[in-house]
């Protein structure tokens, strides 16, 4: 996946790892939603969600306060939760507030086990 040009221009190379992913094309968005939204909707807790996504080859990360889906193969963010149709706000209402560990620089965070 590519990094959205606006984010690259705004944050530069030093913050590239913290950049948000580019919006998905509609075909990719539909495929990911079909493949992953049932997994997300069936999760009963953040640890449960983490485990279920890991089984599909993804993890959860946070960039600039937004939930992002990260490819386990590349370590790159694929899309935001909102882009997948499941924004962080909705997940937090259902699963509770996530417990995260901030990374150096404060722009990214990881979901704690």
Image (spheres, grey):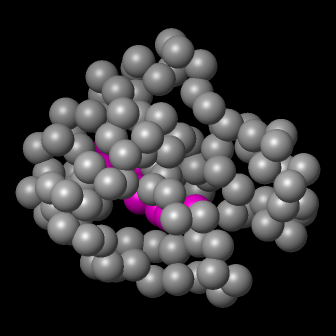
Residue sitting at x 82%, y 43%: 6
Q: Is residue 14 above or below residue 5?
A: below
Picture coordinates of residue 51 (x, y %)? 24, 59
Q: Residue furthest top?
A: 27
Residue sitting at x 52%, y 83%: 102
In the rendered view, does 62 fall on the left or right side of 59?
right
Residue 18 occupies which quadrant of the picture?
A: bottom right
Residue interval drawn in magenta: 53-63
In the rendered view, does 111 fall on the left or right side of 103?
left
Q: Is residue 68 above or below residue 23?
A: below
In the rendered view, does 108 fall on the left or right side of 91?
right
Residue sitting at x 19%, y 33%: 38
Residue 86 occupies which quadrant of the picture?
A: top left
Picture coordinates of residue 101 (x, y %)? 45, 83
Query: Front-most of 32 and 9?
Result: 9
Picture coordinates of residue 109 (x, y %)? 51, 74
Question: How many discs mark residues in the rendered view?
Answer: 0
Q: Is residue 25 above or below residue 10?
A: above
Query: Front-most of 54 and 106?
Result: 106
Instruction: Determine if the magenta segment contains residue 59.
Output: yes
Instruction: Determine if the magenta segment contains residue 11.
Output: no
Quadrant occupied by the N terminus? top right
Q: Is residue 34 visible?
A: yes
Q: Is residue 55 visible?
A: no
Quadrant occupied by the C terminus? bottom left
In the rendered view, does 41 fall on the left or right side of 97?
left
Q: Is residue 98 above or below residue 66?
A: below
Residue sitting at x 65%, y 51%: 20
């Amino acid at each position: 996946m590519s990094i959205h040009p606006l984010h690259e221009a705004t944050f530069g190379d030093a913050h590239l790892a913290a950049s948000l992913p580019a919006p998905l094309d509609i075909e990719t968005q539909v495929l990911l939603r079909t493949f992953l939204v049932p997994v997300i909707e069936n999760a009963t807790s953040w640890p449960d969600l983490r485990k279920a996504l890991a089984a599909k080859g993804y993890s959860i990360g946070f960039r600039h306060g937004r939930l992002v889906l990260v490819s386990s193969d590349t370590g790159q963010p694929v899309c935001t939760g909102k882009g997948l149709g499941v924004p962080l706000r909705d997940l937090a209402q259902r699963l509770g507030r996530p417990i995260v560990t901030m990374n150096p620089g404060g722009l990214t965070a990881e979901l704690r086990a």
